[in-house]
Image (tube, helix red, strand yellow):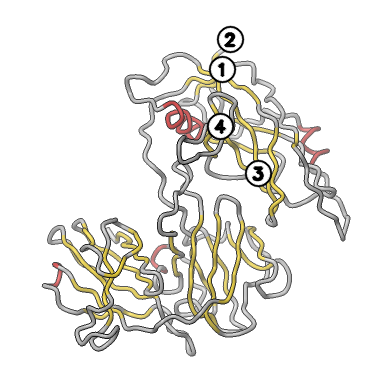
Amino acid sequence: MKKLNILAGLFLGIGLILFSACEDDNDSNPIVQQPETFELNTPALGGNVYDLEKSSYIQLTYKQPDYGYTAAVTYYAQVSMTDKWNDATEESEATYVELNGNSSTCEFGVETSQIDRAIMQLGGYDEETVPKEAVKIYIRLRATLTSGYQCYSNSIALSVFPYYMPVVNAEPEIWYLVGDCIGDGTWGNDGTGNIGVSLIPMSIVDGYEYNATTGQGEIIFTGYFLAGKGFKLIKTPGSWADQWGNSSAPGIDSPVKNDGGSSNLQVATSGYYSIKLNTATDVLTIEAVEAPDVYHIMMQGDFNGWTDVAMTPVNTVEGMNNHVWKYELDATSGDTTAKFKVGPGEGGSADGWGVNWGGTSFPYGIGSNGGANIPIPAGRYNVIFNDINGFYYFYSLD
């Protein structure tokens, strides 16, 4: 076989298949049908060996699943070493890895670094045992609509030269709220400097096992929302490229993920709502919940001799009930610790220690009442804390 160095953006599919498969359908009132599978094409150079270290992408093409109309489909790539596609159980690991990133067209430039990472994870390789020869892998695609109806393509076999890559679990994929009733209400989205000002991070779910390769999975935010005030979710501070809005008029009845052009999410009645987003399946739900207690939040720790320092409320729009707090922590003098607590006289105790949050994880975690002191490496941090579920995040300012 001939060893290939595949350059970034190299198209390996057949254009005619791509265009005919993705041609628009003008059916204005489609009936969704559940497809069994769809066709993933073998790349034109698929009979050769791909050098993953010297390549950037492997370009895949495929036909859209038959949903009964030309639907807005999102595609995800999965890799297996055995062509078996078993999910993880309590007794065994999954036999495949779903890669980071997705495509909404009938072509998908799959990053070779993601493929290599999947091989390292599935094979359990270290620097000594990583294969020195080409190995066979299998790739298939998962297709899904925003409303579900997922299905899987056929798998294709490719030969690749892997290289050693240390496998470190990806950080959970966190999304951010921005809008009229979020933070200061200005819709500011210039970058990470807006976190705790006009951007509020969603929270990890305590005990949830996130995809080790992509960091994708379930995240949540519970808070107070004002009727008639629009908001959206964005993936990356400073970018509008990946966002969630409402596909029809402003509301929460038909959430949609795109790169802009959607209406705002907006509740009809002021109150507390829980937003749940699965970043792996692209499913967003918003539902009303019971009102929690309202506190004033303090921080204490070795950094200040265990004395109360008031955190600053993030939600400052008139009429809002705030539950998200921030504090700029200067710990440049050395490693330290901290906890969160309610103000004096709150939570059923004179000193406020009746309700407090601590944890062992850093830089983020879910604090528990009476939990351990949070270990903090030396540095400067923008500290964000949500008193509804105890989520904290120490964003580095260095």
Tag 3: residue type? Tyr
Foreground label between 1 and 3: 3
Report the quarter where the C terminus lies: bottom left
Q: Earlier in the sequence, mark 2 or mark 1?
A: 2
Q: Residue at x 68, y 56 (%)?
A: 146
Q: Report x, y in % for residue 209.
A: 44, 49
- Tell me the element at label 1: strand
Q: Mark 2: few, some, or many residues within 10 Å (few <14, many ≥20)?
A: few
Number of the label disc, if any, that sits on residue 271: none
Instruction: Identify the residue under disc 3.
Output: 75
Q: Earlier in the sequence, mark 4 or mark 1?
A: 1
Instruction: Identify the residue under disc 2.
Output: 1
Q: Mark 4: few, some, or many residues within 10 Å (few <14, many ≥20)?
A: many
Q: Residue at x 44, y 69 (%)?
A: 200
Number of the label disc, if any, that sits on residue 49: 1
Instruction: Identify the residue under disc 4.
Output: 79
Label 2–label 1 contact, CB within 8 A: yes
Whole-Å distance between the Cαs marked 2 and 3? Answer: 30 Å
